[in-house]
Amino acid sequence: MVNLILKDAAGVAGNIFALGLFVSPIPTFRRIIRNRSTENFSGLPYIYALLNCFITMWYGTPIISIDNILVMTVNATGAAFQLVYVLLFITCADKAKKVRMLGLLAGDIILFAIIVVGSLQIPNYHLRQIVVGVISGFTLISMFASPLFIINLVIRTRSVEFMPFYLSLSTFLMSTSFLLYGILNGDIFIILPNSIGTLLGMTQLLLYCYYKSNGSESSREPLLESLHEHKGVGKGET
């Protein structure tokens, strides 16, 4: 009973902390809507995040894994946010970008449908969980690996200008919460990617504290905006 309460508490906390990540692009989209242009921003991070949320949401359903409803809810919420971002991006993009983004969105939906239909063809419940878990874990690890670009940028420039503190904190708290959730639920497909997310989130916070103490100032620009304008990250990653 205590284990169940702690697991649910960790999952609820993870859902709450995830909101910090989901709302972080809002300043960027305010600018896009205000200017009625996507400028040099890339829509790929939102396309990839949408696919990741779709797949991990599917993994959290009772059809695929046992007692992972809170994994399903956080990713359903994430999918809703990312879908709105993608649609807003398409609305404000020029014709070439619009066509490309529509194609990528269709690709997300088709690929997700293939994973859903394909996994339902696997009669063995345990094998079905492993197959979807591996796919979900791979996409989560790829997403969590994206802060490596930020970490490299911070070390190279010796500045936290492009690494907002609250975004790093949200990543760390969300990953740590779901790491605990996965441990309490004995689910390796949740434990592994969130272990990596926790480690990377902690690294970002330590770097922030170190370089901030040396006089660096945090960016006033949204993270994705800063990366797209200065590094082009996501034009070709939690």
Image (spheres, grey):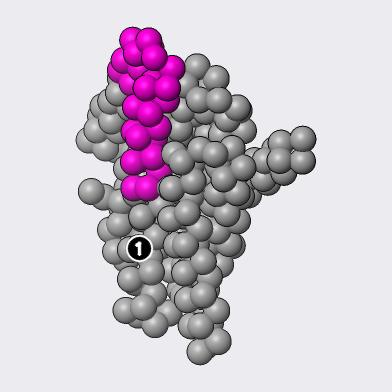
Percent position of residue 2, x then y: 77, 41
Residue depicted at x 30% and y 23%: 111
Q: Position of residue 37 (x, y in %)?
A: 38, 45
Magenta span: chief secondary structure: helix
Q: Please say if 182 is above or below 145.
A: above
Residue under the image location 53 percent in, 70 percent down: 205
Q: Is residue 118 magenta?
A: yes
Which residue is label 1 attached to? 148
Q: Secondary structure at mark 1?
A: helix
Can residue 110 be seen? Answer: yes
Mark 1, Cα crowd under 10 Å, few <14 / some 14-19 / many 20+, is some
Q: As drawn, is 154 to the left or to the right of 74?
A: left
| Image quarter (top left, top right, bottom left or bottom right) of the N terminus | top right
Q: Quick one: 5 or 73, which is closer to the camera?
A: 5
At x 40% / y 43%, what residue is drawn?
140
Query: Vertical placement of 6 versus 87: above or below?
Result: below
Image height of 203 relative to 124, above or below: below
Which residues make up the magenta segment?
Answer: 113-142
> Is residue 33 positioned above or below 103 on the image?
below
Closer to us: 187 or 155: 187
Q: Nearer the viewer, residue 19 or 33?
A: 19
Where is residue 164? Give x, y as percent. Answer: 52, 66
Quadrant housing residue 126: top left
* Residue under the image location 43 percent in, 47 percent down: 193
**Position of residue 165 in the picture relative to residue 51 (left or right):** right
**Residue 43 shows up from this direction:** no
Please say whether residue 34 is one of the residues in the magenta stretch.
Answer: no
- Amino acid identity at mark 1: Leu
- Image location of residue 55, percent across then percent down: 41, 29
Q: Report which quarter residue 66 is drawn in.
A: top right
